[in-house]
Amino acid sequence: MARILFVLSSASHLNLSDGQQIATGFWAQEFIPPYEAFRQAGHTVAVATPDGRPAVLDALCLAPEFHADDPTRPARLQGALAALPDWRRPLAVTAVTAGDYDALFFPGGHGPVADMADDPAIGRLVGRIHAAGGLIGAICHGPAGLLPARQEGRWLFEGYRMTCFSPEEERLAGLAERLPWLLADRLAALGGQLSFAPPGQAHVVSDRHLFTGQNPASAIGLAQAMLKALSSLGPGL
């Protein structure tokens, strides 16, 4: 079976272009369902943060307005988080041996924009998993963890098809004009070939060993796509 490393944000705030700050962290709906899906399939799962500090939950992710389609979801997510100690006692990315893992997964929340987008250690980890043919998954703002992955000065994912939280979704969240930069813009500037579904709709893009999801609604589909790919890599996984 595969060994999968979830990389969560430990950033508690994000600096905005107007000098203000907003609370941030990881988004539970993009972490718990994929984590549980991998575990239920028999894979081994671990959690890391860029600096080894406890991951920070963005409390906004449990607000009822984000779960109108399933009002019971916040309580289930809270229960799962309480039963799962890994995110409070994570590994540090700098101490991770890439050869110990077959796949990476970057959940979103705005946290990764704050503490992963320019982190060389994140870039090296992604590069080593990529070079070994491992799978890399990222959802919503999680693709910020792909940004620092370079080889000989070029971005590793230049020309790859992908998605992330869309500019329209940022606008609807009231942050498009306040963020220091838009993730979609930065990915596209580096050569990512982005596509988006309408706001709030599930959208998963697979290209080679890269798997990306647009938003929280995409979490289960993204996990399923990666599980299918893991099953095709061989009986050892």
Image (cartoon, rainbow, N blue to C red):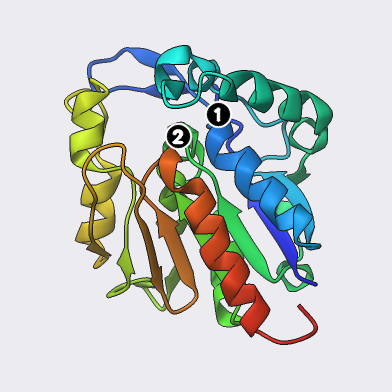
Pick whichever of labels 2 and 1 is earlier in the sequence.
Answer: 1
Question: At which x and y percent is residue 157?
Answer: 37, 71
10 Å neighbourhood of mark 2: few (<14), some, or many (≥20)? some
180 vs 3, left or right, is: left
Question: At which x and y percent is residue 125?
Answer: 61, 63
Image quadrant of residue 89?
A: top right
Q: Quadrant of the C terminus?
A: bottom right
Image quadrant of residue 169?
A: top left
Residue occupied by mark 1? 11
Q: Quadrant of the N terminus?
A: bottom right
Label 2–label 1 contact, CB within 8 A? yes
Real-space Cα separation, disc 2 to disc 1, in angstroms: 6 Å
- Decide which of 45, 115 is in the foreground and name it: 45
Question: At which x and y percent is residue 188?
Answer: 22, 59
Q: Amino acid at mark 1?
A: Ala
Note whether 151 is above or below 116 in the view shown.
below
Observer able to see residue 124 = no
Which type of secondary structure does the marked residue at label 1 adopt?
loop
10 Å neighbourhood of mark 1: few (<14), some, or many (≥20)? many
Residue occupied by mark 2? 114
95 vs 22, left or right, is: right
The residue located at (22%, 16%) in the rendering is 18
Observer able to see residue 28 = yes
